[in-house]
Image (cartoon, rainbow, N blue to C red):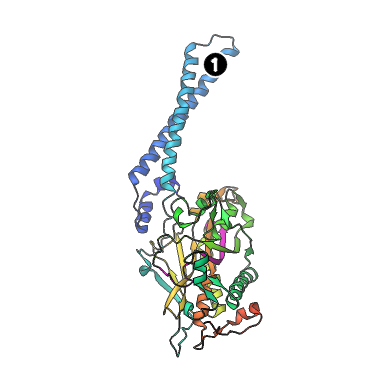
Amino acid sequence: MWDVKFIRENLESFIEGMQKRGEEIDLAQLLELDASTRKQKSILQELQNKRNQIAKQIGILKSKNSPVPESLFSEAESINKESPIIEQQIAELDSALQHLLCRLPNNPATDVPFGKSEEDNIVIRKVGEVRQFDFIPKQHFDIDKGRMDFERAAEISGSRFVILKNDFALMERALINFMLDHHTEQFGYTEFSLPYMVNAKSMFGTGQLPKFSEDSFETKDGFRLIPTAEVPLTNLVSDQIIEEKQLPLRMTAHTPCFRSEAGSAGKDTRGMLRQHQFHKVELVSIVKPEDSENELERMTSVAESVLQKLELPYRVMLLCSQDMGFSAKKTYDIEVWLPGQNCYREISSCSNCGDFQARRMKARYRDERNKQIVTLHTLNGSALAVGRAMVAIIENYQNENGDIIIPKVLQSYMNNKTVIKASKNG
């Protein structure tokens, strides 16, 4: 969330950042609303000061049993009538100003490259060897149709749903448990079990509302199904003042995620890559401002370590300015190799949001040195999207006969099985 005072005082960098984002803004209207709001607040303050002076004068005169001029009472009454009118004007102006501010994305960090699409993202590193197949690898939805049922899911729910059964259902559960154990035991994240529905205030805090209302599902009584565990996890510090000694906070959770996929017509209509409902293990960090850049590197390495454990080849991308999410100031995407598609596809996105979400949520901490209240920085990352991890395993570990080798790190989570035999319906 933007602080209008910061915009006023850093107008050049604000404009540069919005241009880098490709964001069209009515700057004149924004500044005019800000100036009008401040002017009306100044007028109101003068009236309040005048009213206090009149009250003091009246009090002094009464204490001396002196007559109080009628003009003082008239002036006080005039101020009492005028003040609510100005307060209403301030409320309306401020509402219009906030309407503009809350729809503006975060400014990109200085090292984020300018770009208009994913074509402008930068490869930071590639990790792992891409397997050379001696047969033409299949896409995941063509490998084992007996355990991955899109047709029946469509009959029950609609498009962009899937039913997993037997070893595929077990693999999904195994991945979730492995990832949670990995994050909590190896990297010190605290695990949470969270609500899957949140209120509009929580969605506003992390930036999903109001601009992206159509991207989520809303119940009749106003709850929103969570698009990611980032929403409830990050909101654990909303309207809070955290003690500095508690930082950093590193949290993880597995949740189903629900997305309307508005605007995705025609994209990934087959398979598990783009679903209305999917599972994800999320990471969230709450840190001091000076620590957020290093925390982003740490979080990304944690997400990478899951793929390394699963022995899946991947690459890390630095997203360009117009391919980042609304709340992010810098984002790394991790893309896993899918031999069935013969390309890398996103499996994790790790973002530093700076103080953008924390301002919206009023999330702060108390500096131990000077006792000042400081706005926190928030970060979030997928580690990992479970369905996409399954897709990557199925495609990278497939054999020509339809068998799927189970990654070593998952075998203990899958009753010590080493292979998923091709189903007769495959």
Q: Residue at x 46, y 31 (%)?
A: 87
> SS class of the residue under badge 1?
helix
Asked if residue 174 is positioned above or below residue 89 in the image, the reply reads below
Residue 93, percent from left and from top: 42, 37
Q: Is residue 120 magenta?
A: no
For the question of whether residue 301 can be seen, the reply is no
Tell which of 422 and 62 is nearer to you: 422
- Which residue has dot 1 on it? 58
Q: Is residue 282 magenta?
A: yes
Q: Residue furthest front?
A: 155
Q: Which residues are magenta?
A: 267-289
Q: Residue furthest bottom?
A: 134
Tell which of 117 and 353 is nearer to you: 117
Tell which of 287 and 319 is nearer to you: 319
Q: Badge 1 local density, few (<14 within 10 Å), some, or many (20+)?
A: some
In the image, 179: left or right of 395?
A: right
Quadrant of residue 111 within the rendered picture = bottom left
Callout 1 amino acid: Ile
Residue 122, percent from left and from top: 39, 70
Residue 392, percent from left and from top: 50, 77
Residue 75, percent from left and from top: 46, 18
For the question of whether residue 373 can be seen, the reply is yes
Asked if residue 412 is positioned above or below residue 18 in the image, the reply reads below
